[in-house]
Image (cartoon, rainbow, N blue to C red):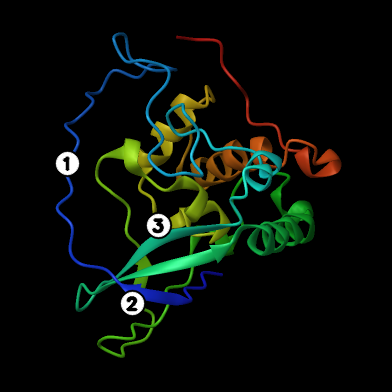
């Protein structure tokens, strides 16, 4: 369930739109693209669509993250802050509870249909959702994971994450959402034991 504790108003930002990557499907980064990038957020990794482990974040004194949400009606934007450990524990509890329902490697209903928050500006309900930048390199993946709002991504964005995590990016939307959650969850929960039960078919293709 999406929860958006609003912090501050955000001014509108101009965001560059990434050009079409074309129809050819490859696993891993394109030829000519470096494996490492500048961090788009302090809590992001230095590789495309790769996040840092919980241990790495906390050891670096990164205890909170922020993201932007936008109203579908009035287009107003707000900045939202999450406590990393609190959200991590909520996500872990959800995965444990839903484990029996994910044996078919498809996303549970709550992940496929995340709830929208209410807008504090136009006062409409169920209108606020994460603002996902068109340039995929700038997507705030940890914010989407901890808010359990990956379901707002489109298939192209989900396939992008699977590609850069070297996971088979075939399948329908249910399967892509499932793969995306665990592409992010497994490295974050690197010492997770039973919670790393997932299998997401890595590929060696380049």
Q: Position of residue 192 (x, y in %)?
A: 80, 41
SS state under label 1: loop
Mark 3 / mark 1, whichever is N-terminal: 1
Quote the CA–CA distance across marks 3 and 1: 18 Å
Going 46% across and 41% down the picture, which residue do you hit? Answer: 172
Judge whether residue 22 can be spotted in this image.
Answer: yes
Q: Position of residue 200 (x, y in %)?
A: 63, 31
According to the picture, the residue beneath numbered tag 2 turns out to be 127
SS state under label 2: loop
SS state under label 3: helix
Judge whether residue 170 can be spotted in this image.
Answer: no
Is 58 placed above or below 28 here?
Answer: below
Q: Is residue 102 left or right of residue 21?
A: right
Disc 2 to disc 3: CB gap under 8 Å: no
Looking at the picture, tell me which residue is in the foreground, 90 or 174. Answer: 90
Quote the CA–CA distance across marks 2 and 3: 12 Å
Residue 196 occupies quadrant: top right
Q: Position of residue 190 (x, y in %)?
A: 73, 36
Q: Quadrant of the N terminus?
A: bottom right
Looking at the picture, tell me which residue is in the foreground, 124 or 200. Answer: 124
According to the picture, the residue beneath numbered tag 1 turns out to be 17
């Amino acid at each position: 369930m999406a929860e958006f504790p609003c912090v501050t108003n955000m001014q509108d930002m101009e965001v560059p739109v990434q050009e079409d990557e074309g129809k050819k499907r490859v696993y891993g980064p394109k030829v000519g693209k470096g494996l490492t990038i500048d961090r788009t957020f302090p809590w992001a990794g230095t590789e495309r669509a790769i996040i840092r482990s919980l241990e790495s974040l906390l050891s670096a004194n990164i205890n909170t993250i922020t993201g932007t949400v936008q109203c579908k009606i009035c287009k107003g934007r707000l900045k939202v802050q999450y406590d990393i450990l609190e959200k991590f524990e909520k996500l872990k509890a959800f995965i444990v509870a839903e484990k029996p329902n994910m044996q078919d490697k498809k996303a549970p209903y709550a992940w496929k249909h995340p709830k929208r928050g209410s807008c504090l500006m136009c006062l409409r309900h169920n209108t606020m959702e994460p603002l996902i930048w068109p340039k995929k390199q700038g997507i705030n993946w940890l914010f989407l994971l901890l808010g359990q709002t990956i379901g707002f991504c489109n298939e192209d964005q989900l396939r992008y994450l699977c590609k850069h995590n070297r996971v088979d990016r075939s399948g329908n939307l249910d399967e892509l959402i499932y793969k995306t959650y665990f592409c992010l969850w497994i490295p974050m929960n690197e010492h997770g034991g039973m919670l790393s039960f997932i299998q997401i078919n890595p590929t060696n293709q380049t």
